[in-house]
Amino acid sequence: ADADADADLIVDFASWRRDVARADETNATAFHGASFEACLTVACSRDSFERALEAIATHDGVYASFGCHPLSATQWDDSMALATRRHLTSNKRAVAIGECGLDYHYETDADARETQKRVFVAQMEMAAELDAPIIVHTRDAEADTLELMRTHLPRDARVHVHCFTSSKAMALALIEHFPNLRVGFTGVVTFKSAKDVRDVVSATPLERILLETDGPYMAPVPHRGEVAHPGLVPHIAEKIAEIKGVGVDDVFRAARAATEAVYGF
């Protein structure tokens, strides 16, 4: 299962659709016997909601989350909050809130960061009220992310901290505080420059790891620079197996159980 992919973007852009349609993995052993069971598409801006609804209505095995990305925080208002709540409470294939969180990498303005915090808190409170899983995005905002999560989420919250590129110390702090939290790793783990991410994988218990592409971005080696899609998950699993010193089947089984624990599919 691909626990985080922007499937609406993959199918929305014609050139990316063509890339995926042409994809031909000539080395079948690279899939390690894996087959597609499910993926989660993330709708985290106002204009992505309808595309995600269409995807889950027309494709088997596709589930969705709804929320507001920190870089879209100015879009969050009563109507977006109402739509998020409505989808989560009325559509069985809408399974989580998010992705939401803090992204200080691209946002340096103090007022804008405060807006991100307010919108993140609102979505955490909604997730807690609805007992819904939440997908957290954090970049260059470790201290504030930890503080807000500890304050506004119950300890037993089901949390997916996605596309993890933060420090090992943060990963361990999150894992210790939230027993139902899982850490998502993408194709970044295969990049030559990503030693710090591999160190986090090494320190993270296998049963707390989710596999994700964050497609269409960050395709794993040997497909770096191409469109990332759920069919590339086996390459991520293979690298994690190498780091952990276990079989790829062990990674698949653990990640499948982790996906079900967080999302219920």
Image (spheres, rainbow, N blue to C red):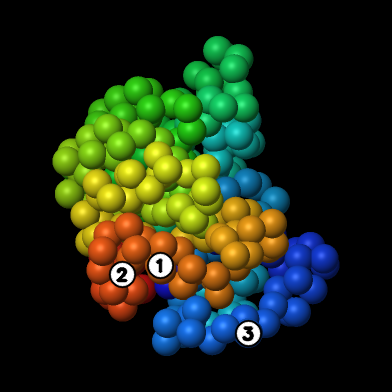
Gap in angstroms between the C-alphas marked 1 and 2:
6 Å
The residue at 44%/26% (across/down) is 141
- Tell me the element at label 1: helix
The residue at 46%/52% (across/down) is 189
Gap in angstroms between the C-alphas marked 3 and 1:
18 Å
- Tell me the element at label 2: helix
**Where, by quadrant of the figure, is residue 74 drawn?**
top right
**Residue 251, numbered circle:** 2
**In the displayed structure, does residue 15 sit left or right of residue 166?**
right
| x then y, percent, for residue 79 | 59, 43
**In the displayed structure, does residue 105 sit left or right of residue 133?**
right
> In front: mark 3 or mark 2?
3
Looking at the rendered structure, the kind of residue marked 3 is: Thr
Q: Residues within 10 Å of mark 2 (few under 14, many from 20)?
A: many
Is residue 260 visible in the rendered structure shown here? Answer: no
Looking at the rendered structure, the kind of residue marked 1 is: Ala
Mark 1 sits on what residue?
237
Is 5 situated above or below 118?
below
Mark 3 sits on what residue?
26
Contact between labelled residues 2 and 1, with CB atoms less than 8 Å apart: yes
**Where, by quadrant of the figure, is residue 178 drawn?**
top left
The residue at 70%/74% (across/down) is 20
